[in-house]
Image (cartoon, rainbow, N blue to C red):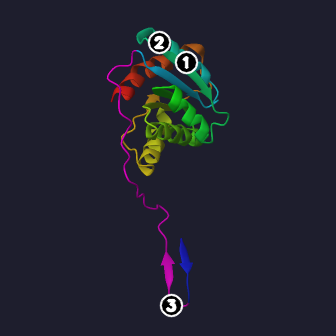
Amino acid sequence: MLQRVDDTRIFAFDPRGRVESTETPLAPRPVALAGLRLGILDNSKWNANKLLRGAAEALSGEVAFAAVNYYVKHSFSKDAAPELLARIAAECDIVLTAIGDCGSCCSCCVRDSIALERLGRPAACIITTEFLKETQLTRVALGMPRLRPVVIDHPVSSITAEEVAVRVGQIVQQAQVVWAA
């Protein structure tokens, strides 16, 4: 973008910008998942509930959680309220958030996970393959590039029950690695 300041000076602005952030470490990772309280943060996207409930059930078949607590934020295109994040951090040891399958919901899922990590809770945010690059940029811009998302096949909103089951398998396989990383 060009901007004329006066008759002798013109400034050119680079629209790509520059990201300057201080890296924030991840929350401490647990030695084991058994006995922990799992928090599930549903962003109310179509099929998020099916994916998250399926993943919680499948994970509970592999890990003896002390509790599984469900939370819902009512707008997928807004960050979770600070009060909700504080409640999740107080009531849970690890968190699974979903679903990021479009631009605004991906960045909000990542920001929710980063906020939970900063509150000391390892968080696994579920995104789809189509938005991996966007979430990487968000993680870098917010100072947490080492936060690993759980990446499942795209799309999510228009899939069958069988496809939900396949994606649940992808979540179960990756979430445990993210929490322990």
- What mark, if any, has residue 8 been given in the picture? 3
Q: Which residue is mark 1?
A: 164
Q: In the rendered image, which residue does mark 2 sit on?
A: 60
Furthest residue toward right: 74
Total count of labels: 3
Q: Which residues are magenta?
A: 7-34
Amino acid at circle 1: Val
Name the residue located 49 percent from the left edge and 18 percent from the top edge. 168
Q: Is 13 or 89 nearer to us in this picture?
A: 89
Corner quadrant of residue 45: top right
Looking at the picture, tell me which residue is in the foreground, 109 or 82: 82
Q: Main secondary structure of the magenta part?
A: loop
Label 2: element kind: helix
Label 1 Cα crowd, 10 Å radius (few <14 / some 14-19 / many 20+): many
Q: Secondary structure at mark 3?
A: loop
Where 144 falls versus 84 (above or below)?
below
Q: As displayed, is residue 81 above or below residue 54?
A: below
Q: Mark 1 or 2, which is nearer the eye?
A: 2
Q: Horizontal and vertical percent for residue 132?
A: 45, 38
Residue 91 vertical placement versus 54 (above, below): below
What is the CA distance from the residue labelled 3 to the residue labelled 1?
62 Å
Question: In this rendering, does residue 36 appear at all?
Answer: yes
Q: Earlier in the sequence, mark 1 or mark 2?
A: 2
